[in-house]
Image: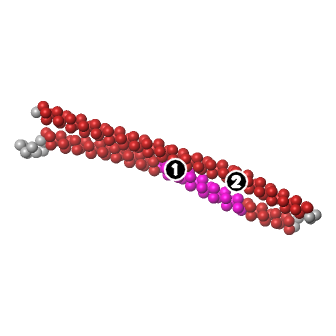
């Protein structure tokens, strides 16, 4: 009888240890997933910040190009001895409006890129939270399964639920 009790105690101990290990493993995996998701989300946010800086630089470059274009048209018109009115002014206005239209398109494209990066950051955090929750649930499920299995093994060791003398 002492050997049977010892085997039962070992079975319960091993089952409990396995269940606790499953829970800890699930929690550790969830923590690792959360950290990785946060790191990836921060990279996307950094990318969005870089896009915003790129937009500031681009705005400065467009302003310089427009300034150069104005200066060029004014100096060429003046160099030919013409007044800066009429056709030269209309040409400058048309070129400047086309450049501003190009700038608006470039700004829109950068805004889309920035929003995509911020959306990816949010999605990464959301996915990471879901995967972490799943890892915890799997750890708890494995622990519960182990405890049920341990209980079943203990019941068979003790002969519970079996007709007398059938073990």
The answer to whether residue 28 is above or below residue 67 is above
Spot occupied by residue 7 in the image (x, y as percentages of width and height): 17, 36
Question: Which image quarter holds the N terminus?
Answer: top left
Residue to which mark 2 is pinned: 58
Tell me the quarter of the picture where residue 98 sits. Answer: bottom right
Circle number at residue 158: none
Is residue 150 shown left or right of residue 28? left
Q: Position of residue 43 (x, y in %)?
A: 55, 47
Q: Regarding mark 2 in the picture, which secondary structure is present there?
A: helix
Whole-percent x, y for residue 77 in the image: 89, 63
Horizontally, is 134 left or right of 149 in the view? right
How packed mark 1 is, by other alpha carbons closer than 10 Å (few <14, some 14-19, many 20 or more), is some
Question: Spatial distance from mark 1 to mark 2, Cα to Cα?
Answer: 27 Å
Q: Report the residue that reaches farthest toward the top.
A: 2
Q: Is residue 116 inside the magenta stretch?
A: yes
Q: Main secondary structure of the magenta part?
A: helix
Q: Position of residue 144 (x, y in %)?
A: 28, 43
Q: How is the image coloured?
A: secondary structure
Which residue bears the numbered disc 1? 122
Q: Which residues are magenta?
A: 101-126
At horizontal 40% and vertical 43% (from top left) the residue drawn is 29
For marks 1 and 2, the one nearer the N-term is 2
Of circles 1 and 2, which is in front?
A: 2
Quadrant in which the C terminus appears: top left
Q: Is residue 18 visible?
A: yes
């Amino acid at each position: 009888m002492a050997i049977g009790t010892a085997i039962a105690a070992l079975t319960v101990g091993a089952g409990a240890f396995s269940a606790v290990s499953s829970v800890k493993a699930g929690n550790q995996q969830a923590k690792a997933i959360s950290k990785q998701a946060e790191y990836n989300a921060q990279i996307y946010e950094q990318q969005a910040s870089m896009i915003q800086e790129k937009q500031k630089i681009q705005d400065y470059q467009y302003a310089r190009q427009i300034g150069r274009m104005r200066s060029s048209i004014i100096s060429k018109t003046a160099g030919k001895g013409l007044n800066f009115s009429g056709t030269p002014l209309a040409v400058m206005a048309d070129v400047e409006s086309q450049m501003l239209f190009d700038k608006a398109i470039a700004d829109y494209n950068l805004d889309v890129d920035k929003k995509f990066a911020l959306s990816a950051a949010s999605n990464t955090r959301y996915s990471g939270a879901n995967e972490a929750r799943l890892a915890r649930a799997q750890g708890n499920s494995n622990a519960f399964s182990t405890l049920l299995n341990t209980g079943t093994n203990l019941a068979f060791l003790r002969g519970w639920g079996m007709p007398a003398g059938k073990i």
